[in-house]
Image: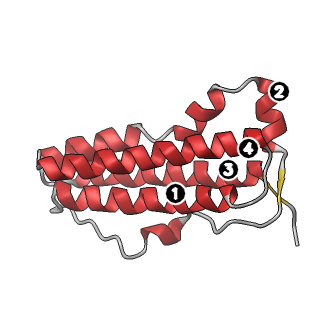
Amino acid sequence: MAIVTVEDVLECAERFEQMLAAYYGELSEHAAREGVRMLTDYMSRHRVRILEALDKLSCEQVDRTRSVPLRYEPHVADHTCFEGVTLSPDSDAADVLDAAVSFDECLVRLYRQVLQQDVEEDVKELFESLLHAEQRDEIELKKIKAMDYF
C-alpha cells in the first residue's frame, strides 16, 4: 500500500478542477443558447479554489501541509464524476446548474473524507476552507437556478 499524502489529494482535486474547466469550456463553445454559453464560459474560468486556498498560506506552511501523510486514501474526484451527466448543446441553464451542483458534490465528498481522518490542524483548516468554498458555491448555484435568470 502506497502512502497517500495531502499533496496527492490536492493534485487529484486540481486535476478535477482542470477537467471541469475544460468541460465547461467545451460546452461553452458548442452551446446553442447565449445564456448557457455565458454561464459555462464563466464557470470554466473560475475553478481555482485550491490555488486560492494555498495562496493564503506561507511557503513553509504549504510545503509542510502537502507532505502530511493520510491514514486512508480518499475516493478521488475524477472522470467518474462525469458519468451520468449528459449536457447537449441544447441544454438549458438549469441543466448546467444541476450538473455543476453534482460536480461540487464530488469535491465535497473528497474533502469530507480527508476531514474524517485524524489530521493536523493546518490540514484540517485547509480542507475545511475548501469544503466551505464548495458548499457556498453549491448554495449560490441553487439560488441562481431558483431565480431562473436564464
Of badges 3 and 1, nearer the viewer stands 1
Label 3 vs label 2: CA separation? 18 Å
Residue 145, above or below 88: above
Give the residue type that dot 3 points to: Glu
Q: Is residue 93 left or right of residue 25?
A: left
Q: Are marks 4 and 3 in contact (CB under 8 Å)?
A: no
Q: Which residue is mark 1?
A: 108
Q: Is residue 28 left or right of residue 105?
A: left
Residue 29, above or below 57: below
Q: Which residue is mark 3?
A: 11
Of badges 1 and 2, nearer the viewer stands 1
Q: First in sequence: mark 3 or mark 1? A: 3
Label 1 vs label 4: CA separation? 15 Å
- Where's residue 7, x and y in %? 75, 48
Q: Residue at x 39, y 63 (%)?
A: 102
Q: First in sequence: mark 1 or mark 4? A: 1
Q: Which residue is mark 2?
A: 60
